[in-house]
């Protein structure tokens, strides 16, 4: 009803279509179909696309995809995820679990373990964990991902470093005052509780994932008194933001030194998100802005997909025999084929 047919040039935007049906009549000089693309050209276009996505979006896509269309082709690409794992944590762990499941992996999940690891929450968690581990293949690794909440504090007007808590008004967490990274000295009790979980895992491989920024690219709310030091784009706010990024990188390095031993590997989540060793802060910020800025706490679906893919690659790369007393290879020991330099933040140099 109300539609008219017009012969005209293609509109520049869909808004210009309005209620008109535009019909383009055939012309003798224009063919009705395109010839089938040759495999060589198809491969050239796909490789170029994958390389550009890796370059501009900092992804880690396979630049040599399988192009076979045989119906009985059961070939699995090298590095394809298939290894299950046990995930322990909270909301970020649940999102990682969903990303792994979407990739065809069948992980186990122990979520709802509390906002942070405390003696009370770990006391309640240990019996649940032990019941699962009894029947679980010793080769299945355990991933602990629940340190983000304790790695950040708020600073009030008196300069006191306080825990970020929920407000009664909306039952949500708010950074009333300035945002700050927790000093590693204040995480001593948290480390003790993480080590209790590690001991319960016996000879299994254990990966402990550190913290990514929160409330940095997106504040907890619109109140200008919340996250006050990192709001806006002036030099003061940008300087505070970079100090927090640097402090967080230092904290992850400190946690790595304390927790990485034997079959236990601390993993900087920035490396999972990037898919490679963090060489400089600029490359990390680019990825965070594109995948970790829609929420104050969580990344978007792409971010958790990238974390899940990198995590599976890491677990396969460092797979060990649970009966081998030597445990995992020291992650700080550089392999011959790994030529990427490790450049720590400026404040870490010279330590």
Image (spheres, rainbow, N blue to C red):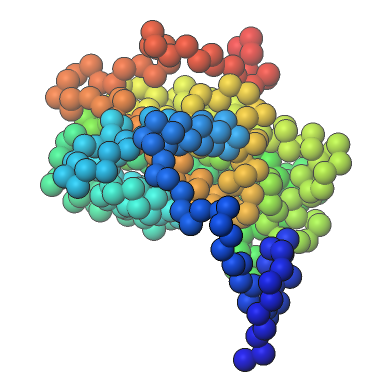
Q: Is residue 203 above or below residue 91?
A: above
How far across and down, in percent of the image, does residue 317 sit?
Answer: 31, 25
Q: Is residue 237 above or below residue 32?
A: above
Q: Position of residue 120 (x, y in %)?
A: 39, 52
Query: Residue 248 falls in which quadrant of the image?
Result: top right
Residue found at x 43% / y 14%: 338
* Quadrant in the rendering for residue 52: top right
Q: Is residue 279 left or right of residue 178?
A: left
In this picture, residue 157 sits left or right of residue 182: right
**Which residue shows up at 48% across the image and 57% down it?**
32
Q: Position of residue 198 (x, y in %)?
A: 31, 35
* Numbered-mark total: 0
Camera-side residue of 100 and 16:
16
x and y percent of residue 245 in the render?
A: 66, 34
Is there any visible trace of residue 12 in the rendered image? yes
x 70%, y 53%: residue? 219
Using the rendered view, name the quadrant where residue 160 is placed.
Answer: top right
Q: Can residue 310 be seen here?
A: no
Query: Quarter of the image containing the C terminus?
Result: top right
């Amino acid at each position: 009803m109300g539609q008219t047919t017009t012969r005209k040039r293609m509109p520049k935007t869909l808004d210009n279509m309005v209620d008109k049906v535009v019909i383009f009549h055939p012309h003798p000089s224009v063919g009705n179909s395109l010839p089938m693309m040759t495999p060589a050209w198809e491969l050239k276009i796909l490789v170029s696309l994958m390389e550009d996505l890796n370059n501009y979006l900092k992804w880690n896509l396979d630049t040599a995809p399988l192009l076979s269309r045989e119906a009985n082709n059961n070939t699995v690409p090298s590095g394809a995820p298939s290894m299950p794992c046990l995930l322990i944590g909270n909301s970020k762990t649940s999102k990682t679990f969903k990303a792994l499941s979407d990739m065809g992996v069948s992980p186990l999940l122990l979520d709802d373990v509390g906002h942070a690891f405390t003696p009370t929450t770990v006391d309640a968690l240990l019996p649940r964990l032990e019941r699962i581990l009894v029947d679980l293949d010793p080769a299945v690794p355990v991933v602990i991902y629940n340190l983000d909440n304790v790695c950040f504090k708020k600073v009030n007007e008196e300069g006191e470093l306080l825990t970020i808590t929920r407000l009664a008004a909306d039952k949500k967490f708010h950074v009333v005052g300035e945002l700050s990274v927790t000093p590693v000295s204040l995480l001593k009790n948290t480390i003790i509780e993480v080590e209790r979980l590690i001991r319960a895992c016996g000879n299994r491989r254990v990966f402990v994932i550190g913290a990514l920024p929160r409330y940095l690219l997106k504040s907890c709310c619109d109140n200008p008194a919340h996250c006050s030091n990192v709001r806006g784009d002036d030099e003061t706010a940008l300087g505070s933001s970079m100090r927090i990024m640097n402090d967080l990188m230092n904290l992850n390095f400190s946690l790595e030194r304390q927790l990485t031993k034997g079959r236990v590997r601390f993993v900087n989540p920035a490396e999972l998100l990037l898919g490679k060793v963090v060489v400089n802060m600029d490359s990390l910020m680019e990825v965070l802005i594109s995948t970790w800025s829609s929420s104050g706490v969580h990344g978007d679906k792409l971010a958790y997909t990238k974390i899940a893919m990198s995590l599976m690659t890491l677990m396969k790369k460092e797979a060990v025999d649970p009966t081998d007393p030597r445990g995992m290879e020291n992650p700080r020991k550089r392999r011959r084929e790994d030529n990427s330099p490790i450049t720590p933040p400026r404040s870490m140099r010279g330590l």
